[in-house]
Amino acid sequence: MKLPIYMDCHSTTQVDPRVLEGMLPYFTERFGNAASKSHSFGWKAEEAVEEAREEVARLIGATAREIVWTSGATESDNLAVKGVARFHAAKGRHLVTTAIEHKAVLDPMAALAREGFEVTVLPVSREGLVDPEAVRAAIRPDTVLVSVMHANNEVGTVLPVEEIGRITREKGVLFHTDAVQSLGRIPFDVEAASADLVSLSAHKMYGPKGVGALYVRRRPRARLLGQIDGGGHERGYRSGTLNVPGIVGFGRAAALAREEMPAEAPRILALRERLRRAILAGLDRVTVNGSLERRLPGNLNLSFAHVEGEALMIAMRDVAVSSGSACTSASLEPSYVLRAMGVSDELAHSSIRFGLGRFNTEEEVDHAARLVVEKATKLREMSPHTATSTQ
Ligand SMILES: *Cc1c(COP(=O)(O)O)cnc(C)c1O
């Protein structure tokens, strides 16, 4: 077993060696610009880009022409939220989202609110789930977009997008879902979810960083304004020379995900359960944050009462995990996701997120569990709270 062990797959994942192999020729002999129409260098690049478009589309039950390449899901989320709001501004200026969305959705929503749009932020349950009926109740005549993620990046909860999509379709409101965390981990289908716009990212599913996509429905057509102008690439939705090697890698990663998900998801779930059981057997006062039933197979988010998450993370430095969200770890604020679920600040500060993936083994899980139990026990012995604890 090699140290350190990586268990932070919601932040990013290793590029699968098979993905890298597929990408390499597109840095060197096949380096053409996919927009160059006058020579074979361009044609070869374009062919590879279109093949990748097919693969990514197939993974989500879409057609290739509905896939718009971006620099990652942050851009996809911005394009979906701002692009729809600005296109439909004359029709309505009301948007609906949830308290546990990624910042790549919440920050564009906040930017639009400063421009005069109105945003309804739906609460979540203690389990980290959203009630579809709350979505229905929030929709008004001037609502133009509902944005609800498929799976949460901190607690791994899987939100009821199919029920929500049925409601938005019935109400004639566009539905955007950030499916970054579910892509390649659990099935997602644009028809089943009645989704109009879907954000995707390669680096959370064993592809390279810096490449993503936005699914834009064609029937019935989802209309939105491009947010980056200059050249009219990607049917005007997103100008800029395409990241050909990155896109090739995304396509390869999507093909592998499609082939391997049926065997991989149960294997990762078994690892997650092995980790959860070993930690809970070795420690008391540990709580699981978020629903265990509606959850990504590789996610485990635990709170360790009377243990600082940051301290535990440092103590077990051979195992790479996150405390709270990696995206907010620059601040000392407790995770806004856990807070929205009603978790106390103290328990939010004591939380650790494990993200298991394709390359984790049982041996690694056993090592991590032993380390967590040992270090948390030691930290509790040192903690002034423990002696006075009533629980
Ligand atoms: C990582 C992540 C993003 C941002 O994706 P990038 O490709 O890194 O910009 C957006 N949404 C969710 C849910 C994520 O986990």
Image (cartoon, rainbow, N blue to C red):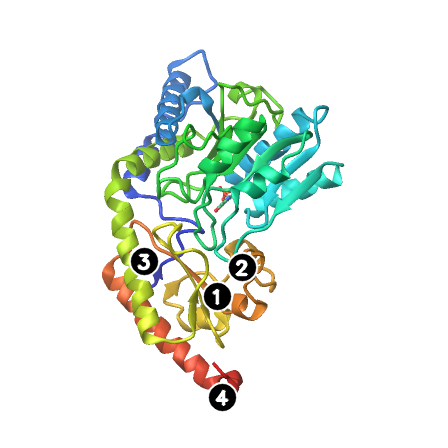
Dot 2 and dot 1 residues touching (CB under 8 Å): yes
Type of the residue with mark 3 = Arg
Name the front one of labels 2 and 1: 2
Q: CA distance from mark 3 to mark 4?
A: 32 Å
Q: Is mark 4 within 8 Å of ligand 1?
A: no
Image location of residue 9, percent across then percent down: 39, 52
How many residues crowd around disc 4 within 10 Å: few (fewer than 14), some, or many (20 or more)? Answer: few
Look at label 2 and name its amino acid: Leu
Spatial separation of the CA atoms under disc 1 and disc 3: 16 Å
Identify the disc placed on residue 387. Answer: 4
- Going from N to C along the chain, the mark reached first, 3 or 4, is 3
- For the residue marked with disc 4, what is the amino acid? Ala
Q: Residue furthest bottom?
A: 387
| Mark 1 residue crowding within 10 angstroms, few (<14) / some (14–19) / many (20+) | many
Which residue ends up furthest to the top in the rendered image? 38
According to the image, label 1 marks what residue? 351
Q: What whole-number distance in Å separates the C-alpha atoms at marks 2 and 1?
A: 9 Å
Residue 354 horizontal/vertical position (percent): 40, 59
* Residue hosting label 2: 338
